[in-house]
Image (tube, coloured by chain):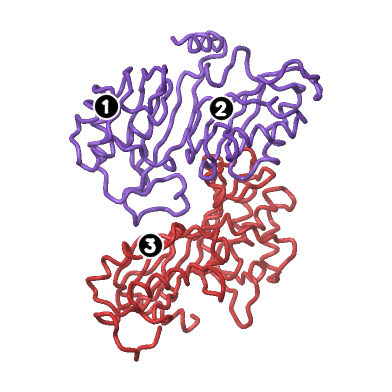
Chain colours: A purple, B red
Amino acid sequence: MGDMSRPDISDGERLRVRLDLAYDGTSFAGWASQPGLRTVQATVESALETILRGSVGSCRLTVAGRTDAGVHARGQVCHADLTMAADDVDRLAGRLNRLLPDDVVVHRAVVAPSGFDARFSATWRRYAFRICDRTEAVDPLRRHEVLAWPRPLDLAAMNAAAEGLLGEHDFAAFCKRREGASTMRDLRELVWSRAAGVLECRVVANAFCHHMVRSLVGCLVVVGEHRQPVPWPREVLAAAERSSRVPVLAARGLTLEEVGYPPIDQLAARAARVRGGA
Amino acid sequence: MGDMSRPDISDGERLRVRLDLAYDGTSFAGWASQPGLRTVQATVESALETILRGSVGSCRLTVAGRTDAGVHARGQVCHADLTMAADDVDRLAGRLNRLLPDDVVVHRAVVAPSGFDARFSATWRRYAFRICDRTEAVDPLRRHEVLAWPRPLDLAAMNAAAEGLLGEHDFAAFCKRREGASTMRDLRELVWSRAAGVLECRVVANAFCHHMVRSLVGCLVVVGEHRQPVPWPREVLAAAERSSRVPVLAARGLTLEEVGYPPIDQLAARAARVRGGA
């Protein structure tokens, strides 16, 4: 939130600004700021601070989906509480893009509607995991976002297995454990398709715990290689504890594609409910 | 062609092998070998020489479309005359891909049909030039192959102007001059479309001279910005000499997508005709 008591060195009022952005995660140590590492958060915050001439830390971003090192985003959403004139928000995306490196692009900057919180108002996140399962068919121009897989994968088997994972469950088997954090999630879509030589898994849930998409996809790939039968992922889920037989696939294949929010009049209620743990 | 008199150090006969390949041109100084520079030709020839344990220069590649520094390819075709068993050609693509860097992929290696010449048998080449004309809409994951353009482009005006360039003409106005080389070309398609925020120009001709696609596209972009009227590119063409008002667009937006060949029984006749300058 920054220090509300500092003098306003930019003209204007304190506004909540929503940023929609995309990045190539290849050269980032993930979203979240970490000392000494190149992260998306620190890169964008630094550009905001340059534009607003703010002191370090006054442009803190809150993000919808914290992505790990190497994970990409096309539809990431974040917000910041900034001291600036509302009229200047229209030009903020352009000014940010002139300062930002090539691998981050701000698609849009707008004054957020009342009650909006990029993280807590979000009702769903959609990820895509992309694999090319014939090494010779790899498109070198997409190698940063499509994982090359050395063996052919059975699309129908993976889709049959995916169905057993849909719905609200404890996804502890697919999550890196965090002390005190719930691993209950509502998995709404998990479906593979194949187009132009690329297998794409579309994954939608209310939210994801750490490593969840890469573990879900890894589990299905084991079925796709016929190393486990179609019912196996459902059994892994039911066991509700991590198994070393579920691989966490490489980050490069994963992209956060879209974040969903409720209608404007439900934003604040949604945020309050999620913060309260409902 | 290499030295036919050298002893056969690999088992097998002298075969003409066709390679279909793709590359991200970003880190290459183009296709053609140049001393001290990283080129696609030298990279692939070196991998072939490693596999065939041939002496340097015995795996010389002949290519359908010599691409400039920074230009990409998805459907490049080349051939080499190699001393190897026909049965081993089936495994050649896989072996090459294990040796090649990430930015080059061999999609296919086959024994070429009789009379095949990657360069002289080709009847057409298809390129795509991709532009994103809203800086804020740039997809950072495609930034290596889609040129960001700072001003909006008028698709309809560019397509109207493109029509005036179709057909067989002297394209000297759009070609970097080479002593004694003809600049007569048959331009068969030149059409813009817009999909998912990206403008794509599809360009098909029997062949292209140096800088031709990037100049054609550059000329149309001037019209797309309304800095010249729709008939202007046709006037530039008619003048038949290079104009400083025609920009050569950046290489990064250009990709060789496909090369066309006639039916097998016409390959040799086609090659003889093109070599003869017909």
Which label was assigned to residue A163? 1
- On screen, residue A50 versus residue A167, left or right, reads right
Using the rendered view, name the quadrant where residue B260 is placed.
bottom left
Which image quadrant: the N terminus of chain A? top right
The residue where tag 3 is placed is: B106
| Within-10-Å neighbours for mark 3: few <14, some 14–19, many 20+ | many
Q: Are marks 1 and 2 in contact (CB under 8 Å)?
A: no
Camera-nearest residue between A107 and A69: A69
Which label was assigned to residue B219? none
Identify the subunit bearing mark 3.
B
Q: Residue at x 74, y 21 (%)?
A: A83
Residue B213 rendering spot, x and y as whole percentages: 58, 62
Q: Is residue B81 above or below residue A179?
A: below
Q: Secondary structure at mark 3?
A: strand
Q: Residue at x 30, y 23 (%)?
A: A166
Mark 3 and mark 1, same subunit? no
Mark 2 and mark 3, same subunit? no
Q: Secondary structure at mark 2?
A: strand
**Looking at the picture, which amino acid does disc 3 mark?**
Val
Which image quadrant: the C terminus of chain A? top left
Mark 1 and mark 2, same subunit? yes
Identify the subunit bearing mark 2.
A
Q: Secondary structure at mark 1?
A: helix
Q: Are marks 2 and 3 in contact (CB under 8 Å)?
A: no
The residue where tag 2 is placed is: A77
Residue B154 rendering spot, x and y as whole percentages: 65, 45
